[in-house]
Amino acid sequence: MLADDTDALVFSKSNAVKQIASEEVRQNLVWKNIFRLGFFHVGFVFACSVYGFGLSAVPIKWLTVLWAVICYYVSGLGITAGVHRLWSHRAYKATLGLRIMLMLMYSAAGLYGIFYWVKDHRIHHKYSDTDADPHNVKRGFFFSHIGWLMVERHPEYRRRQKEIDLSDIIADPVVMFNKKYERELFIIFCIAIPVAVPVIFWGETLLHAILTQCFIRFIFTLHCTLSVNSVAHLWGYRPYNRVINPAENPIVSLLTAGEGFHNYHHTFPWDYKASEWPYLSLNSTTLLIHALWKIGWAYDLREPSPALVQKVINEIGHKPDASYLIH
Ligand SMILES: [Zn+2]
Ligand SMILES: [Zn+2]
């Protein structure tokens, strides 16, 4: 594994003091997104009602529930190990076969294309909690969680997106394939296969397969992912950089296979672990990447040296008598 200390402290310090003046602008609603989100949330409430109040005449099979959990977990790892740590941060390298596998896993989550996710995420890191940040937490919990998906992008985002280097993403044919066939991949890997498997292999009813996969699993995965932008930017400890909003939040880590160590992640974004701690600490994404490294599918794993982490803590991390309240 590689230790990468390049400009780490400089990055952390500049990240800590960076601030762009807030700009009052009108952002139009995007009704297409509002309708889509509304449709799936209404379906989610309906599905929860069916199971919560025992409204279904035919009971759901336990294999269908297990299958929904597996799909949640597999698609979640496509987000964390794939579009986040691999493509957004280049925290490790992956063989072509692994990149294809992660792209298909990510497609099962039903989020937007890898290209746009990476662009948004790189802007999020470079301009965290400012108007250029797509889900600026300084605009409140609702906006940072899901409201940002319902409005047009802020003008500051449009200006700053030109500064983001995406040449590595454009050069990756796996990402470009995902960009070209985003809709088809969504239909096949997020809807068709997850719904068809329980119906074909253990005779589940189509209704149970649709309710568990298209509504409960999809919406649950969506909100777990969004909680990194909202919850982990609002609540938790800030031991690595005390003047930024991203915080260490173990509940978010539990829900997102290890993405809630967010104060560390914003301080050392190139670390493949996205945490100071090894994979047994609520971080199954790190466990997966480590296993893939063992078999040679993942390589050039990057992480800062322990000495650098300690140096950053001493310089800009918490002081023993510091307050951990949100600033
Ligand atoms: Zn963040
Ligand atoms: Zn990140």
Image (tube, rainbow, N blue to C red):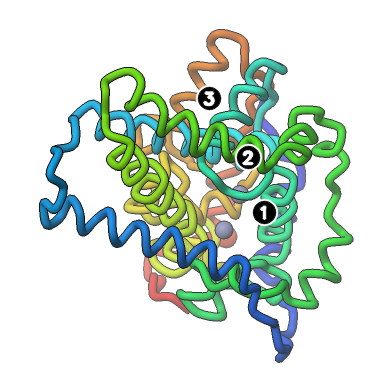
Q: Nearer the viewer, residue 46 or 262?
A: 46
Q: Earlier in the sequence, mark 2 or mark 1?
A: 2
**Residue identified by numbered label 1:** 121
Q: Earlier in the sequence, mark 3 or mark 2?
A: 2
Task: Please tell me whether mark 3 or mark 1 is closer to you in this view.
Answer: 1
**Residue identified by numbered label 3:** 289
**Ligand 2 neighbours mark 1 (CB distance < 8 Å):** yes
Q: Secondary structure at mark 1?
A: helix
Work out whether 95 lies above or below 46.
above
Q: Secondary structure at mark 3?
A: helix
- Bin the neighbour count of mark 3 within 10 Å (Cα to Cα): few under 14, some 14-19, many 20 and up: many
- Bin the neighbour count of mark 2 within 10 Å (Cα to Cα): few under 14, some 14-19, many 20 and up: many
Image location (x, y in percent) of residue 160 = 83, 67
* Residue type pointed to by label 3: Ile
Q: Quadrant of the N terminus?
A: top right
* Residue type pointed to by label 2: Val
Work out whether 106 lies above or below 63.
below
Q: Secondary structure at mark 2?
A: helix
Task: State the mark number for residue 108.
Answer: none
Is 101 left, or right, of 88 in this rendering? left
